[in-house]
Image (spheres, grey):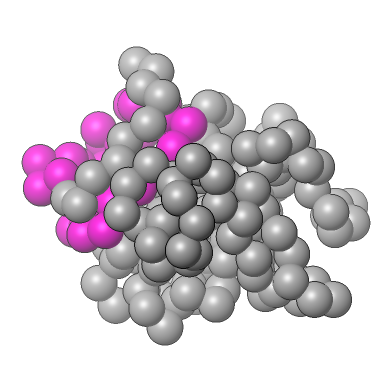
Amino acid sequence: MNQQTISSHQYPWLTMNNLLEINPSHLEMRETKFTNEEMNLFIRNWINGGNSNLRSLAFRLNNLNLETILNGIPSVLRTAPGSMPYNWCPLSSFYSLFSVLPPELITFCFDQFFEIRNVNGVVASIVVERVANDDFILLTWPDYKGQPYPVELIV
């Protein structure tokens, strides 16, 4: 099933199996019951070509642990030489965490992230700065304005 956007405060009925079956471009939930291990499964699915429409994901997890989420996933910790902009168009209240701009377009800036790539060569950034807030953010490139990935790709 292809769904353009799933954005809500919470979906208590949503399971990991549901998440793996739907194929939205944007997933956003301020409260989830997903575990770090389930996020690892979701990323592995994306790396293997699943959720091919995904452009951005923003979840608030309980006790987010990037070490568990990235366990066994090829990734490179990157630090941009300054803020790296990503043009994002979140559709719910999550945008207020990042900017005072209206939700039509937000330039989300970050400088530390894990770089991952799927089997189709799509690069994603897992943002590190928001971990203290239990915010798990995955952004795929190009961004919503078509800006390509600005840092050298993993070889």
Q: Is residue 140 left or right of residue 120?
A: left
Q: Residue at x 79, y 48 (%)?
A: 149
- Asked where in the image residue 141 lies, by quadrant, the reply is top right
Q: Is residue 18 magenta?
A: yes
Q: Is residue 145 above or below residue 115?
A: above
Residue 136: x and y, percent?
43, 63
Q: Is residue 140 above or below residue 119?
A: below
Residue 42: x and y, percent?
42, 46
Residue 113: x and y, percent?
65, 69
Residue 11: x and y, percent?
15, 44
Q: Residue at x 10, y 48 (%)?
A: 12
Quadrant of the rendering where the N terminus is positioned: top left
Picture mark count: 0
Q: Is residue 69 left or right of residue 22?
A: right
For the record, the magenta segment spans 11-33
| Front-lying residue, 28 or 12 | 28
Q: Is residue 131 magenta?
A: no
